[in-house]
Amino acid sequence: MADLSLSTEEIAQFHRDGYLGPFDLYEPGEMEKNLRALRPKLLNTRKAIYAQDRAVSGVTNLANYDRHLDVDFLGDHITRPEIVHRVSSLLGPDVLCWRTEFFPKYPGDEGTDWHQADNFSNVAGSKHPQIVWPEDSEFGGTITVWTAFTEASVDMGCLQFIPGSHKTMNYDESKVMQYDADSVNKVEKDGVRRGFFGYDYRQLQKDPDWSPDESQARSMVMRQGQFIIFWSTLMHASHPHAGTTDQMRLGYAARYLPTQVQVYPYSESLAEFGGEASLDKFGCVLVSGADKYGHNRFVDTTVNGTPFRIAS
């Protein structure tokens, strides 16, 4: 495999804008074939690491978090050199994947509200950060690689970014948002249906009178099988699904960190979106280099008997 590391110019662009891409990973036909094979595996949550915990209410099911740990295709996906080489260009040689999530958007669904994430404590029902960078770090956050498992057009609810907004946090994550399942698909902001899976990000604003400058927003239209890389501290959102097609939009987000960052250092369970799940079976996946710190738990290097492939 050729070296797919980012160029000096691409790295500078990422640090300026907070995102880079989209990049090609799968051909649309290849991705569609993979998706057809994936769907029945996702419905079978018996091997999912959160499957045995109490039922989860709301639109986001914790049983479908971190499915890279029990589904071969997803385990392979997070270690693809096309992704890992580029992420390592930004984070350094020693990189882990700590979390993956599906983001479906069905016809008629609201858009996702503008938000940023630094330490991911705001939806956890506590003030405990989910990730902790070393004290001398200039900034926190995580790199998210968002892959379009289906087409992501404006009408189908593609991502939106505000370039350069990753350098200033507009939200105070020491506050805790209140989950309200009844608000899903019922929130309208400035004439646009925008929510956050039962949360209201305005509860975290440092300045209650502030609002994002949407005139600077860019829509990230992606074809099926492409991916985009962005800092979680970048102001990002998504359009509503206009319902002009009966096809859902499905995105898959994999989150990466350098190995010196601590993952879930103060938590024994994951509490989000009205549900709670034990972290007993959780582990990070080393996707590049080595772990020289020893403060994170890593999973066995196999998925269903198949070794994880560290990109080289």
Image (cartoon, helix red, strand yellow):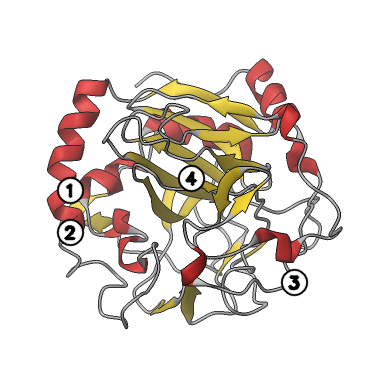
Which residue is identified by label 3? 174
- Along the line of sight, which residue is nearer the eye, 271 or 241? 241
Q: From the viewer's perspective, is residue 92 above or below residue 185?
A: above
Q: What is the distance, in whole Å, between disc 1 and disc 4 at their CAs?
A: 32 Å
Place of residue 59 in the rendered image (x, y in percent of width and height, measured from the top left): 39, 62
Of callouts 1 and 4, which one flags the residue occurring earlier in the amino acid sequence? 1
Which mark is first along the chain, 2 or 3?
A: 2
The picture places residue 255, in percent across and down from the top left corner, at 50, 49
Q: Do the residues under discs 1 and 2 have CB atoms within 8 angstroms? A: yes
As displayed, is residue 147 above or below residue 141? above
Horizontally, residue 97 falls left or right of residue 42, namely: right
Q: In the figure, residue 166 lies in which quadrant?
A: top right
Q: Which residue is mark 2?
A: 43
Mark found first going from the N terminus, 4 or 3: 3
Instruction: Indicate the quadrant containing the C terminus: top left, top right, bottom left or bottom right.
Output: top left
Amino acid type at circle 2 is Leu
The local secondary structure at tag 3 comes to loop
Query: Where in the figure is residue 274, as x and y percent of width and height?
Result: 46, 75
Q: Which mark is residue 289?
A: 4
SS at mark 1 in the image: helix
* Mark 4–mark 2 CB contact (< 8 Å): no
The amino acid type, in three-letter code, at marker 4 is Gly
Q: CA distance from mark 3 to mark 2?
A: 35 Å
Describe the element under mark 2 as helix, strand or loop. helix
